[in-house]
Image (cartoon, coloured by chain):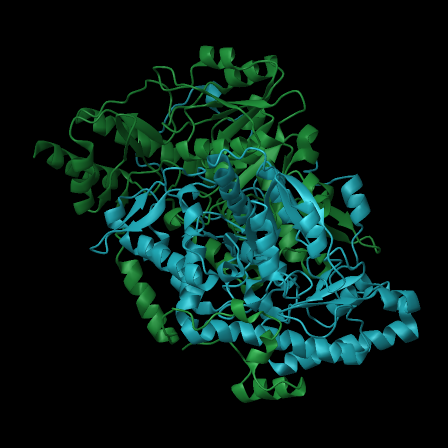
Amino acid sequence: MGSYLPETREGRADMLASLGLTGPDELYSVVPEEVRCGSLNLPEGLSELEVVGRMEALASENVRFGTVLRGAGAYRHHIPAIVRTITSKEEFLTAYTPYQAEISQGVLQSIFEYQTQVCELTGMDVSNASVYDGATAAAEAVLMCLERKRGQVVVAETINPDVMTVIKTYCASRNVPVVSVPAASDLGVDLDALRAAVGPTTAAVYVQSPNYLGVIEDMDAVVAIAHEAGAKAIMGFNPISLGILRTPGEYGADAAVGEGQPLGLPLGFGGPYLGIMATTKALMRKLPGRIVGETTDAEGRRAFVLTLQAREQHIRREKASSNICSNEALCAMTASVYLATVGPEGLAQAARLCAGHAHYLADSLAELGFVCKSNRAFFNEFLTTCPVDADQLVSALAKRGILAGLPTHGGILWCATELNTRADIDRAVCAIKEVCDL
Amino acid sequence: MKLLFERSVAGRGQTVFPQLDVPEVAFDQALLRRDMPRLPQMAEVDLGRHYTELASQTHGVNDGFYPLGSCTMKYNPRVNEQVAALPGFTDIHPLQPVETAQGCLRAMHELEAMLCEICGMDAMTLQPAAGAHGEYTGLLLIRAHHLANGDTARTKIIVPDSAHGTNPASAVMAGFTVVSVPSNAQGGVDLDALRAAVGPDTAGLMLTNPNTLGLFDPNILQICQIVHEAGGLCYYDGANLNAVMGHARPGDMGFDCVHVNLHKTFSTPHGGGGPGSGPVGCKAFLAPYLPGPRVAQDADGHLSFEQPEQSVGKVRSFYGNFLVAVRALTYILTLGREGIPEASSTAVLNANYLAHLLAEAGYDLPYGERCMHEFVIDCGPLKAKTGVSAMDVAKRLLDFGIHPPTMYFPLIVHEALMVEPTETEARETLDEFVQMMTAILEEAHTDGERLHGAPFTCPIGRPDEVTAARKPHLRYEFGE
């Protein structure tokens, strides 16, 4: 069996003896006999060599696709080499939450830098240090906007369905009604229905843009509708798109939330990911989670600390703004290194490549009879009709090393990123044509 | 040191992305952002050095002893990192067809089964992303159970006053009100106070056992019985599971559901605050309410996802922090049947060894020397005598190159230092810690005043936290 115990068996026996004990079982003498368990039904431990083989065998049971044309909430992007180098530094990897500021300035400063980058990216005033993922960021944002006389929230049905489910879970346990607003025929949220749904008890309106089906929503109208009713407007965003597209801040949103995975985090079968959450100065003290602030020490040196902790569970207990404690700090650092590596022009180029490739894919697919179901502007995802059986298409393409778009909403939701080059798309489209002609 | 933004020079950077190989999309001007984000523009070499400097100002487990009570800062094996970086795991899309992701589903299925065995539970979900997220999920199960029984009056969760702050905060998020019960003189749950607190409005009890004082509650069976007889359920906060693995199981103590912290007990790193993972286990009668989708295996060993019919809904996108789960699976497979209980008993041994020596050195241990995996020192008597507080002792420890114990927790000991050495420290590390603590005790008695100024050798002295909170400065301001 493998073991990470540095002390030898003999050394441990000596330590036990120094306490007047004869065996490790005596350490548990306070545990009632009825509660003591016998040997666990677990396999024998393994050496490092064996466990690596075992885990490699598991990994090899998965199929890695050469071409991925699927997004729907998780995106395969290029990860610059230095991102992994920096985030595997063992000081960052093995530190706890930076409670002791004097020996945690590195982590604290990196969070402060992350917060600044998020503010720049989103056009918002304040960012927290991260929450679990994009879905919990949305749910926390909705709860953050609740007021004594505003206890209902309005959510567009055009958002990512996982995000919708998580919002509903979080709201159900707090008895907060969620009114969902359907899509119009152009796959954007139905603005008339949205206007009808908001009212004097609406705390927040949540809309994602680009939405789940890729459409760039009319956020000017959404924010205006929310604000006219006295409600807060929350915008969900794709961080890569903000390299070129208008920011939540520029739309006048009160909060901005997004899945940060595209910023240097691998697909990883769904996690760990990164919940980005930013808001205005007005809502700063309602923001959940850790926040790092700049201050000084007694000698006037710049210092970073966890701050505004009066919002948090370890101080406020049942009166806290959220129960969150551990967050996704290393994922936030990953995003921060990613953004610093690509810089403003690199991020814009990534966005242009994503949009360009997606539009090229859409044009190529249209020639095969996969017609866009919306004529609205889109970023890097779009829903098309499917002239053949969708499940058969997916499995036929899988055999050719291509992960097809996701069958949903009576069609297929396609995605392209900077990794899907023109040549890559041409090959995929050839394969799709072959499958359709069969 | 300088911030990224202060090192940025316009025009610098590296070429990460190629030129467009397709026509550029002409978006309507109204859809475009007006100003470029002021992200750093830096050469890769300068970026690398920036983070090397930040790393040098960060203390991790690999930098030195880290006896941070309640956080289980054990060594994070490198093989876990290597395995979690296998492209066969990192490059798998969460929505790719399950036939093409059988390895991921099998990893989840195996880990769920092993965690069930260790906790004495029947079913497990890996979806919660952290301990507090697990608490919330577990409480949703309790809520769903009562509501399914038409029991709408059970609105209260009982939490001992020694509990982690996340317990009451999670209870409120899950729609409950919180009833706090006091601890008895031995640091356990006061049975009379518990009997007085339970009733027809009791939804459940949240308990850590061993508790935050590092004490195993010998009345645990009676505690669960009192709650069950009142119609409530019992929730086990797995924060301290590292004390009892393979020796006592929450399920056998009478608990109905539990969360475990993979980033504590199962050696996955904390990453400076996350990502963690907080799987939730439960007895069979609560399984129908678990978040979906759940992994199911058919007779041929083929794995698929199923949606529980009465699920409380999702608490996170997809299936949780999968790559963290991969690390935990690697760890359990490595230690195995014998290594898991040995890890716990050694963690308990190390704590008892330290507690004994620190008591001998003159520190006050209000609940005695015998403990489980952690113990609490009360610096109250020291402060009364010398003016030196728990904070001063902790800050002075920084000068010795180690991370101090948890300060001022649990709340029921006012000048608390909570020490958790974990099993991955050798005897000499523990002995050195005792020497440091002894030296500080001497300093307290000879020159206590000086200790208020500690630390003396860190990159900064004690930061001004009051100003930080009064005049929040939460992002870099670009000079314009």
Q: Is residue B406 visible?
A: yes
Give the chain coloured cyan: B
Of the chain colours in the picture, the one used for chain A is: green
Residue A431: image quadrant is top left
**Quadrant placement of the N terminus of chain A:** bottom left
Considering depth in this image, is B184 or A299 the residue closer to the camera?
Answer: B184
How far from the left and from the top, in percent, is residue A40? 42, 70
How far from the left and from the top, in percent, is residue B416? 77, 62
Q: Is residue B321 left or right of residue B235?
A: left
Q: What residue appears at the point 88 percent right and 65 percent down from the top-left corner?
A: B383
Against A211, residue B135 (above or below) is below
Against A340, residue B251 (above or below) is below
Considering depth in this image, is B335 or B29 the residue closer to the camera?
Answer: B335
Q: What residue appears at the point 55 percent right and 61 percent down from the top-left corner?
A: B264
Q: Is residue A360 left or right of residue A101?
A: left
How far from the left and from the top, in percent, is residue B347? 58, 73
Q: Is residue A336 visible?
A: no
Q: What residue appears at the point 56 percent right and 55 percent down from the top-left corner?
A: B236
Q: Is residue A309 left or right of residue A163?
A: right
